[in-house]
Image: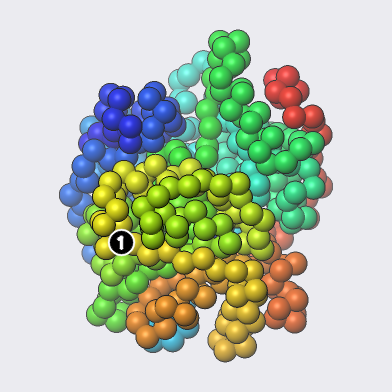
Amino acid sequence: MKFISTRGNSPAVSASVAIRTGLAPDGGLYVPKSFPKIEISESLNIYADFATSIIQPFFQGDSLYDDIPEICRKAFSFDVPLHWLNENQAVLELFHGPTAAFKDFGARFLANVMEKLQQGKERDLTILVATSGDTGSAVASAFYQKKGIKVKVLYPEGRVSKRQEKQLTCWDDNITSYCVTGNFDDCQKMVKTAFQDKELARDWDLSSANSINLGRLLPQIVYFYYSSLLFFKRTGNKPVVIVPSGNVGNSVGAYWAMELGAPIEKIVLAVNANTTIPEFIETGEYTPRASIATIANAMDVGDPSNMERLRYLFPDHKQILKNMEAFSVSDDHIREIIRNTYSKYSYVMCPHTAAGEWVRQNNYSDGRSVVVSTAHPAKFETIVEPEIGRAVEIPEFLRGMLETEPKFKRIQSNINQLF
Ligand SMILES: *Cc1c(COP(=O)(O)O)cnc(C)c1O
C-alpha cells in the first residue's frame, strides 16, 4: 500500500514514511495511490477494533503493520455515539475525547504512531504546532508524556478563548506552551521559518502535527464509516452526511470512507461566512482569501490547507458537482439554530455543529441525515449560553484541565525565542 503526492513529483512511500515526513518533497500532500480492500469486523461494539479493520490495510507492507491494533486501542479509548434527534436525523458526537473536539482522533493516532517510530532513536523529535485554538490542545494532550518527543505549542496572545487558553497551558513535562505577541498568522510564520532554517535542521529533528499530515486523516475515515453503518443498520438507508468544515480535512476523511464502501448517500460541507469552498464548488474557480472572524472560529479559514486533496479527488469540475455540495451559514443563523435545537430537542450544540444543523434544516429536512458534531458546546460557552439561557455543563474530563494552574512562556514572534 503506497501513498503518492498530489503534485505527482515525489516517490511513492509507505504510510509511516508519509506520516513522518508530513509534506511530500515536491510540496504536495500525500494521498492513497489506490484504496485497499477492507474487511470490516462484524461487531460494531468495540470502536478500536473497528478502527483497526479500516486503518491496518493502509499499512500493508509497512513496518508498523503489526502495531496498528495496539495503536488504535491506545488512541481510541472513548465513546463515538450517534445521538438521534428523531427517527431520521442523528448527530455524530465526536467530542468525547480528552479535549472535547474531533481533533482528538487525529492527534491521538498521530502521537501513538510517532512514539512507535521514535523507538530506538537517539535524538528527540520536536513537534512545532501553531494553533488558533482546538488543534494545539488536542496535540498537546495526545503527545503528553510520549517518549522521545517534545512539543512546542504556539498560540496568539489574547486571540483564543479563556477555556481554550486553559486547555493549552495546563501541561508540563514534554509540552511547552508559548503565548506569542501577535496573531495566528505570526505563529504560523514562525513554524514555517523554523522548518526552513538550515542551522536548526542540523541541530534538531523537527516535525509538525497539522491537519495536512496523513496520520491525522486516516483515523478520520473511521468514524464516517462506523456511523454510516450504524445508521444503515438502524434505518435501512444511507444517510446524507453533513460536515462542518474549515481546512476540509474532516471532509476528505468522509470521501475516503465513501471510496472504501461506507454506506453514505452524499457528503455536504457546512462552512461559516468564509465562502472559499462553496464558491469553488459552484464555479470550479479556486480563489483563496484572508479569513473572516466568525463565532464558529475553528472554521475561520480562507485558504483551506486540504483543498489540494479535494481538487485531486475531483480533477473535473462536473465530478465535484455530482458528488459534493457546500453551504455557507451566517453567525445569525448559527445562533438561531443553537436556540431552536435547544427548545425543540433539549439538545445543546456548539457553533460549528449548529452550522451543520442549519444546512440540514434548510436543505435536507425531509431526508435521512447525520450532522457531524465537531466539538462539545462547553468549549464555546460564551456563545452558546446566552442563546439557551443557562450554563452548559462541563464534562468531567474537561473540568480537570480547566482547574490546573496555567504554565506558559510569553515570547515575541521570533524563532530565536523558541530554541
Ligand atoms: C478543526 C475544526 C473544524 C474544521 O475541521 P476541518 O477538518 O479543518 O475542516 C470544525 N469544527 C471544530 C470544532 C474544529 O475544531
- Residue 96 at x, y percent in the picture: 54, 62
The N terminus sits in image quarter: top left
| Residue 166 versus residue 409 in the image, above or below | below
**Left or right of residue 145: residue 88:** left
291, above or below 95, in the image: above
Q: Is residue 389 left or right of residue 174?
A: right
Residue at image position (28%, 46%) is 315
Q: Splitting the image into 4 quarters, where does residue 174 fall?
A: top right
Residue in front for this viewpoint, 172 or 387: 387
Q: Residue furthest left?
A: 37
The secondary structure type at the circle numbered 1 is helix
Horizontal side of 24 relative to 159 (left or right) equals left
Q: Quadrant of residue 13?
A: top left
Q: Can residue 84 be seen in this snapshot?
A: no
Q: Quarter-wise, where is residue 364 in the image?
A: bottom left
Q: Position of residue 62 (x, y in %)?
A: 28, 31
Label 1 crowd (10 A; few <14 / some 14-19 / many >=20): some
Q: Which residue is mark 1?
A: 321
Residue appearing at x 80%, y 47% in the figure: 158
Q: Please state the horizontal and vertical placement of residue 61, each as a whole percent of the image.
A: 23, 32
Instruction: Specify how the rendered protein is coloured.
Output: rainbow
Residue at image coords 22%, 46%: 35
Q: Amino acid at mark 1?
A: Leu
| Vertical order, 36 against 251 (above or below) | above
Q: Which residue lies at the image location 52% right of the left edge and 75% below the top edge?
A: 358
Residue found farthest to the bottom: 344
Residue 384 visible from this viewpoint: yes
In the image, 167 versus 250, the foreground residue is 250
Percent across and percent down for residue 16 are 36, 32
Q: Front-most of 52 and 326?
A: 326
Picture quarter with the C terminus: top right
The image shows residue 254, relative to residue 206, as above or below, that is below
